[in-house]
Image: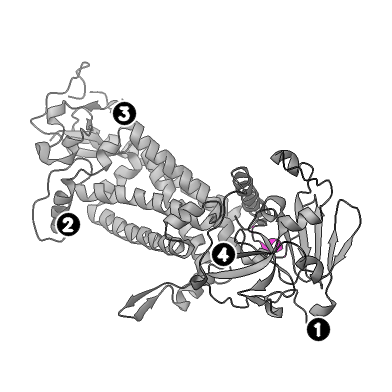
Amino acid sequence: MPKQLEKKHPLAIRWMHWLNFPLLAMMIWSGLLIYWANAVYSLKLFGNEFFHFFPVGFYDFLGIPFRLAEGMQLHFFFMWLFVGNGVVYVLYTIFSGEWRALVPVPSSFKRATRVALHDAHVVKELPPQGKYNDAQRIAYTLVILMGVGSVVTGLGIYKPTQLAWLTSLLGGYEWARWEHFWLMIGFVLFFVVHVLQVVVAGWANFRSMITGYDIVEAKASEPPAPNPQGELA
Amino acid sequence: MSDDRDIKTDEVRELPREEKWPGGRENTANILDEPRELSDPLDDKTANREMFRRSRRGFLVGGAAALIGIFGWRWMPDETKYKLLRGTLEFNEWVSQNLYSPKRLAPEYTQDHVGQIRVNGMEGMSEGFDPADWKLAVTGLNSGQDLFLTMDDVRALPRTEMTTEFKCIEGWSVVLHWAGVRFSDFIERYPPTNYFSDPRDHFQHRHGLSKYVSMSTPDGGYFVGWDMESILHPQTLLAYELNGQPLTLEHGAPLRIASPLKYGIKQIKRIGRIEFTDDRPKDYWGEQGYDWYSGH
C-alpha cells in the first residue's frame, strides 16, 4: 500500500508551540507567587463559597508562600519572551498563510458541535476537515485571543496610571486583576483539554508536532506522482 | 531503487486545488483555501524509514533544547539570575520612562467610592514619637542651606485634595480621599539644586534638576527613593489628611506621601527627611527584591 508523507507543521510553528509551553508555565507559576499575596478569588454558588483559589495545602505543597518579590521579577522578565513569542507566532501565521488552517468561519460552529458530539461518542461521523477540525480552529484561535486578553489586562494592572484609559476600559483596576486571573484559569483548562486530546489522538499526531510530518495512505484517486528519475516508484 | 538516498520530503508539492481536502464547501479548509502538502507516493519501507529519520532528528534536537533550557536555568548562578531579573526591571523602567507623560492622570472617584485602609506595615514607625516635636529636614536645596520645616510651613503651601485608588503591591486596592500639598508645589517653594522655574519652556523647566528624591522616617527605619518624574506628577501629594481627618499616627502623621502612581510601599508614612539627589537613593523594599520604581 503506497504511503505519502504529509507536511503538517512548519518548523517555525513547532518551535514557537514548544517554546510557549515553558513560557506560559513560567507566567502562571510567577503569577501564582504574586497572587498568593492577595488570594481573594473563589467559586461561589448562591453566596456559598465552594472552592477558594487556592487551598493552603496547594500553596504549601508547591512552596509558594512569601515569594511575591521573586514572582514579580519573574513575571516581568518572562512577559517579554511570552509576548515576543506570541507576536512572532501571529505574524508568522498571517504571512505564511498558516492562518488558513487555524481560523474558523461562521459555519465552523455547526461543524465544531458535531466534532464535540463525535468526541462524546454521540455521533459516529466526523465532519470533513483540513489539518485541524473546526473545534480545533475555534480553540486555537480563542487561545490566541486569550493571550491578547492576558497582555491587555496585564498592562492595565501593571501601569494603571499611564494606561488609565485601558484600566478604565477593563472596568477598573480590581476588575482587570480579576479578568487576568480568570484568563489564567482558562489557559490551565485549555492545557488540560489539549493534553487529553493529544493523548487520545495518539502517537503519530504527537510526533507530527515534533517532526512536522505524518504518514498517510496514498489515495488511489490521486494523480500519479511525477517521478523523473524512475526511482522510488 | 537506492536505499541510501534521502527523500526530498521537504520539497512536498501542493495538490491541485479541487483535490485538496474532502467535503467541498462543507470543509472550512476548502472555504479558506488551506494548502495541503504531500510527498510523492512511497512504499511502506521508504516512508517508515524517512519518518524514523525525521523523528530521530526532531526528538534529538527538541530534547537537547529542553535540557539546555531546564539545566541552563537551574544551573545559572543565583547572582547571574538576579542580575538578569534586576536588569530586566531596570529595562522595563527605561521603557516606561520613555513612554511616560506627567499629563496622564489616574482616575479620580466620587466620595461614595471611598473606603477604609488597613494598617499594613509599621516599619520605621518606632514608639515614643510625638508629632508636636516633629520637624521636616530638607536637604539638597538650591539655596545650599538645609531646612527644618514645621507643619505650619507645609500647611502654608497650596492645599490639594484628591480621591484616588490606593494600590498595595500585594494586590489589593482601596479608594481614599487625600488632602495635602502637591510635591510639585513644595518644590516650587523650596527649589532643589539647579532647579529654576521657567513656565515659557517646559524642557528648560526641568533642566539640571536632581534626578531623585530620597525620603526616610525620623528614626531612619523606613526609607524610599522616588524618581523626579513621578514625584512631580500632579497627583503626588505630601498628604496630611486622610478621608477628611488629620492623619492618624499609624497612617503616617503628621506628613506622608500619597500617590496613585506607585504602590503603597513607596508612599512613605511619617516623613522625617527629604533629600534631593542625583544618586539613586536606597529603598527599603527595593533592597528586598522588589522593583525600585514599583509604579506608574
Question: Of helix, strand and loop, which one carries label 2?
Answer: helix
Which disc is residue B128 wearing? 1
Mark 3 and mark 2: Cα distance apart in space: 34 Å
| Extreme-top residue of the structure | A228
Q: Are marks 3 and 4 on the same chain?
A: yes
- Badge 3 sits on which subunit? B
- Indicate which disc, 1 or 3, sits on the residue closer to the N terminus: 3
Q: Residues within 10 Å of mark 1 (few under 14, many from 20)?
A: few
Which portion, as a residue range, is magenta? B284-291
Q: Amino acid at mark 2?
A: Ala
* Residue B278 appears left or right of A4: right
Asked whether residue B143 is drawn in magenta, I would say no
A41 or A173: which is nearer to us?
Answer: A173
- The residue to which callout 4 is attached is B164
Q: Residue at x 32, y 57 (%)?
A: A190
Which disc is residue A194 wearing? none
Mark 1 and mark 3: Cα distance apart in space: 79 Å
- Badge 1 sits on which subunit? B
- The residue to which callout 2 is attached is A116
Q: Are marks 3 and 2 on the same chain?
A: no
